[in-house]
Amino acid sequence: MTAEFVRDAVATCAIFGFFGMVWFGWAHEAPPARLRRPLAAGLALSIVAVVVGGALTWRYWSDGTVFDEQTGPTYGIIVAIEFAIAAVGAVVLAIRDRQDLIPPWIAIIVGLHLFPLAMVLNYPMLHVVAALVTAAGLVAVPVARALQVAVSAVTGIAAGTVLLAAAAYSASTIAAI
């Protein structure tokens, strides 16, 4: 379940590290005090993934990539559709004064967009990440209610943890490529 090229694996590490950082940051919106240190640790580790993944991407930039004349535009279309659906949903939720539901909405859309990307990029591990991030969005509201914490905290912790683990996995696969 590794990327075909080293450059793609380490770029995935950087990308997932970046978005893990975003989710851990979003979880800081209103977390219980007991979660502030674990959230800070997740944020710090995500920053490390960005830096390490970015540096290694720079190092292996010329070593090949799955992106070509077909995969590049297809990737762009999938990401554009994801952004559009996420943005429209977030605006609708904001208009309806349901900002608390924006994080799980975004997580669901992010997770769902990873399924076609896994096929386009021929990186099966993305299916696992897709399922887990989608699940994080789907369970965030009931879990937040049960624990009496902010939905953004639950969504951010779950999605951030999945993405940080995926970043670490992607970086660890270099030896297998």
Image (cartoon, helix red, strand yellow):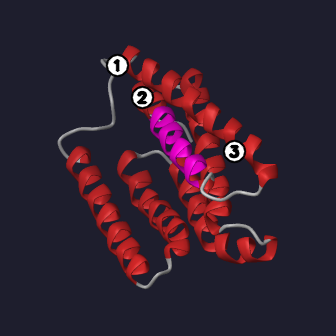
**What is the C-alpha distance between the residues marked 2 and 3?**
32 Å
User: Does the segment drawn in magenta span residue 35?
Assistant: no
- On the image, the x and y values in percent for residue 151 come to 64, 68
> What secondary structure is marked by label 3?
helix
Residue flagged by tag 3: what amino acid is it?
Leu
- Secondary structure mostly taken by the magenta-highlighted segment of the chain: helix
Dot 1 lies on which element? Answer: loop
Amino acid under disc 1: Asp
Q: Residue at label 3?
A: 39
Q: Position of residue 43 (x, y in %)?
A: 62, 38
* 90 versus 36 height, above or below: below
> Mark 3, mark 1: which one is toward the viewer?
3
Q: Are marks 1 and 2 in contact (CB under 8 Å)?
A: yes
Q: Which amino acid type is marked by label 2?
A: Phe
Magenta range is 12-26
Give the Cα distance between marks 1 and 2: 7 Å
Where is residue 134 shown, x and y percent of the image? 56, 65
User: Disc 2 or 3, which lies upstream in sequence?
Assistant: 2
Tell which tag, 2 or 3, sits nearer the viewer.
Answer: 3
154 or 139, which lies in front? Answer: 154
Check the image and report above or below for 138 versus 133: below
Residue designated by label 2: 5
Distance from disc 3 to disc 1, alpha carbons, whole Å, reads 35 Å
